[in-house]
Image (cartoon, helix red, strand yellow):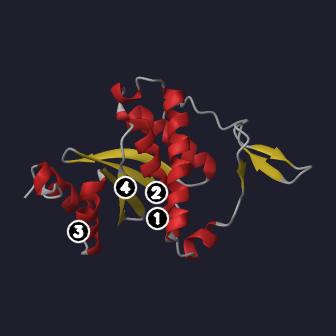
């Protein structure tokens, strides 16, 4: 991982007198065991909250990287995102491309319901940065989770492929061929 602008030292503030953990913007955080999230069912309200959290963090990252973030290398943004996720204990992430399709890959991330939370978080981050609505579809592979970023109109089709057992390479191939696009967007 390259040197990041994001510096975790001082980002999380511990107030032992009051038993609180917060960020510089005064948002309170709680430390919970990963197993608690892993074993829980994630309801729609939790998914919405995770998306809002991602949107807030995406806006912060956009401010950190700069207003020209969309003109910069995607690796630079994902590098900053990787440091942020690592600080919160959500694992490491990096960018991989398969046949021209980009995936955010999370390694050492918690599983189960936490994957759904992370998908919503990432969708929120990229929606805030790209100033458009995005969805993230998770695909499990070799102990990592690959998140494909897509528009809302394509997410259901990609989710159905994954539910039917499609692997990362197959999803990338099908997306490259445009199979995920609705007819109104030039798909089949």
In the shown orientation, is residue 102 left or right of residue 44? left
Write the residue at 46% across / 37% down: 79
Q: Position of residue 145 (x, y in %)?
A: 40, 60
> Which badge, 4 or 1, comes first in the chain's sequence?
1
Label ID, residue 120: 2
Whether 9 is drawn above or below 30: the answer is above
Which residue position holds label 1? 116
> Which badge, 2 or 3, comes first in the chain's sequence?
2
Q: How many marks?
A: 4
Secondary-structure class at tag 3: helix
Q: Nearer the viewer, mark 2 or mark 3?
A: 2
Write the residue at 58% across / 33% down: 6
Which residue position holds label 3? 161
Q: Quadrant of residue 40?
A: bottom right
Label ID, residue 185: none
Q: Quadrant of the C terminus?
A: bottom left
Q: Position of residue 23 (x, y in %)?
A: 71, 42
Task: Tell me if label 1 and label 2 are in contact, CB under 8 Å.
Answer: yes
Circle 3 residues within 10 Å: few <14, some 14–19, many ≥20? some
Circle 1 residues within 10 Å: few <14, some 14–19, many ≥20? many
Task: Tell me if label 3 and label 4 are in contact, CB under 8 Å.
Answer: no
Q: Nearer the viewer, residue 121 or 173?
A: 121
Answer whether residue 177 is visible to the viewer in this image. Answer: no
Secondary-structure class at tag 4: strand
Task: Tell me if label 2 and label 4 are in contact, CB under 8 Å.
Answer: yes
CA gap, disc 3 and disc 1:
17 Å
CA gap, disc 4 and disc 1:
9 Å
Residue furthest front as drawn = 184
Which residue position holds label 4? 136
């Amino acid at each position: 991982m390259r040197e990041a602008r994001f510096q975790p030292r001082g980002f999380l503030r511990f107030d032992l007198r009051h038993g609180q953990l917060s960020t510089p913007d005064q948002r309170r955080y709680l430390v919970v065991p990963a197993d608690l999230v892993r074993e829980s069912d994630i309801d729609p309200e939790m998914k919405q909250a995770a998306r809002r959290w991602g949107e807030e963090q995406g806006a912060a990252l956009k401010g950190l990287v700069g207003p020209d973030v969309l003109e910069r290398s995607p690796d630079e943004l994902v590098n900053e995102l990787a440091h942020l996720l690592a600080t919160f204990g959500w694992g490491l992430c990096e960018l991989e491309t398969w046949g021209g399709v980009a995936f955010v890959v999370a390694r050492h991330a918690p599983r189960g319901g936490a994957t759904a939370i992370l998908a919503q978080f990432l969708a929120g981050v990229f929606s805030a940065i790209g100033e458009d609505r995005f969805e993230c579809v998770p695909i499990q592979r070799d102990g990592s989770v690959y998140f494909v970023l897509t528009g809302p109109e394509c997410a259901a089709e990609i989710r159905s492929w994954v539910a039917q057992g499609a692997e990362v390479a197959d999803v990338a191939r099908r997306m490259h061929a445009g199979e995920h696009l609705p007819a109104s967007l030039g798909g089949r």
